[in-house]
Image: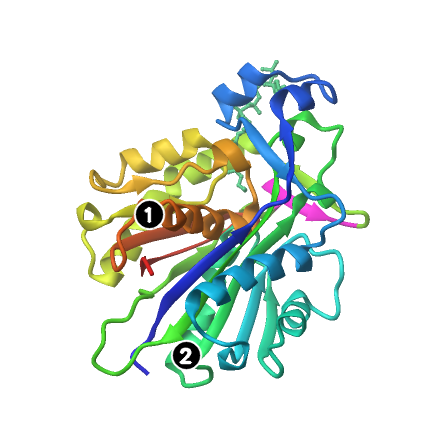
């Protein structure tokens, strides 16, 4: 196969909004510090909904928008680092609820870079002829693994899911998912952990910040080069939504004057593997990126891991 392209996207967020003022009632923080240092104003928190519930809701929207039937999907993959249940995995639960009867179904955990890893593996399966159409989902219930007494982390995270339907591209047609640039910095793994039982997020924020603002821009540019897309041709840049200061620092190094830069973090917080599909799905919903235009996705975080690729907007 020549490759794959994104046919449609969808997203889901729980209805409960947690404001900075709400957090100031719980820990020693304030709205001004959070806005200045991170850029977050609100985040959504799931109550009864599980990772699988949110993943299913986002995937159902993407599937409906794609025009495909459940029976057309032969691969389902869910990127998540916060699913509490180990087995059945989230992917099979989503498939079952959507009536996808016998797909290849796997979860993938590279934390905040998960959606780009899952998109790459689904694209590679399609290229290899192992699948025709794939549901690729990023879904997180980080509120389950948040220490709500730790002000350095609990102000950062939110719950959400974002999903894409990938379909095969006929020979001779332009692929819509570019080659991935992916990797990790395993020696730095301890600076962001969700470890032990009961697990919760622990982060050396400054160490992650330094890595993100120094190591990642050249890798994002490498993803453009691999796709044969000049940075100035990008219509949108959708980086992991961890901190507006990190996003701005990376953007300054990219030369992307024509790109809409996603800043969904302001209203959604950091939703780890859900953050880039959530942000891209919203840009598409608001018609901020033309169909067919090149978009750079770039995820990074726990592990430390990173992955990015240029995709064509559905
Ligand atoms: O998604 C995975 C990838 N993760 C990231 O990319 C996160 C990267 N790191 C960051 O975004 C930032 O490091 C944070 C937002 C996590 C923290 O911001 P910072 O500017 O690095 O703050 P800091 O940790 O250096 O703390 C500065 C001060 C400290 O007080 P002192 O020691 O200077 O008196 C903290 O105790 O701010 C204090 N502080 C807070 N103050 C009010 C820490 N958290 C808070 C808070 N409210 N919530």
Residue 35 placement, left or right of 166: right
- Please say if 73 is above or below 39: below
Q: Quadrant of residue 308?
A: bottom left
At x 59%, y 54%, the residue is 139
Q: Tell me the quadrant of the picture where the N terminus can be found.
A: bottom left
Q: Quadrant of residue 212?
A: top left
Tell which quarter ligand 1 is in: top right
Q: Tell me the quadrant of the picture where the C terminus can be found.
A: bottom left
Residue 246 position within the rendered picture, expressed as x and y whole percent measured from the top left: 42, 33
Residue 27 placement, left or right of 178: right
The residue segment tinted magenta is: 190-196
Q: Is residue 49 magenta?
A: no
* In the image, farthest residue toward the bottom: 129
Residue 40 position within the rendered picture, expressed as x and y whole percent measured from the top left: 52, 28
Residue 166 position within the rendered picture, expressed as x and y whole percent measured from the top left: 42, 70
* In the image, farthest residue toward the right: 197
């Amino acid at each position: 196969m020549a490759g794959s392209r994104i046919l449609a996207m969808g997203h889901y967020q729980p209805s409960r909004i947690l404001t900075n003022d709400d957090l100031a009632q719980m820990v020693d923080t304030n709205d001004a510090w959070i806005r200045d240092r991170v850029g977050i104003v609100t985040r959504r928190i799931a109550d009864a909904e599980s990772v699988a519930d949110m993943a299913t809701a986002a995937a159902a929207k993407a599937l409906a928008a794609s025009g495909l039937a459940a029976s057309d999907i032969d691969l389902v993959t869910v990127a998540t680092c916060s699913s509490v249940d180990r087995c059945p995995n989230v992917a099979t639960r989503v498939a079952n609820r959507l009536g996808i009867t016998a797909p290849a179904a796997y979860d993938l955990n590279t934390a905040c870079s998960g959606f780009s890893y899952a998109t790459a593996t689904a694209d590679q399966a399609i290229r290899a002829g192992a699948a025709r159409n794939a549901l690729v989902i990023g879904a997180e219930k980080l509120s389950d693994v948040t220490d709500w007494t730790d002000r350095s982390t609990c102000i950062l995270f939110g719950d959400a899911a974002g999903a894409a339907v990938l379909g095969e591209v006929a020979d001779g047609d332009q692929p819509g998912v570019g080659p991935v640039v992916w990797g990790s910095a395993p020696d730095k793994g301890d600076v962001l952990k969700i470890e032990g039982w009961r697990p919760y997020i622990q982060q050396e924020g400054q160490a992650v910040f330094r890595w993100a603002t120094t190591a990642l821009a050249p890798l994002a540019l490498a993803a453009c080069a691999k796709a044969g897309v000049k940075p100035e041709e990008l219509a949108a840049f959708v980086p992991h939504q961890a901190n507006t200061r990190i996003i701005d620092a990376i953007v300054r190094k990219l030369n992307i004057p024509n790109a809409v830069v996603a800043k969904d973090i302001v209203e959604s917080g950091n939703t780890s593997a859900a953050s880039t599909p959530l942000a891209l799905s919203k840009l598409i919903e608001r018609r901020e990126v033309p169909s067919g235009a090149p978009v750079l996705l770039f995820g990074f975080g726990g592990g430390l891991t990173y992955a990015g690729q240029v995709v064509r907007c559905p």
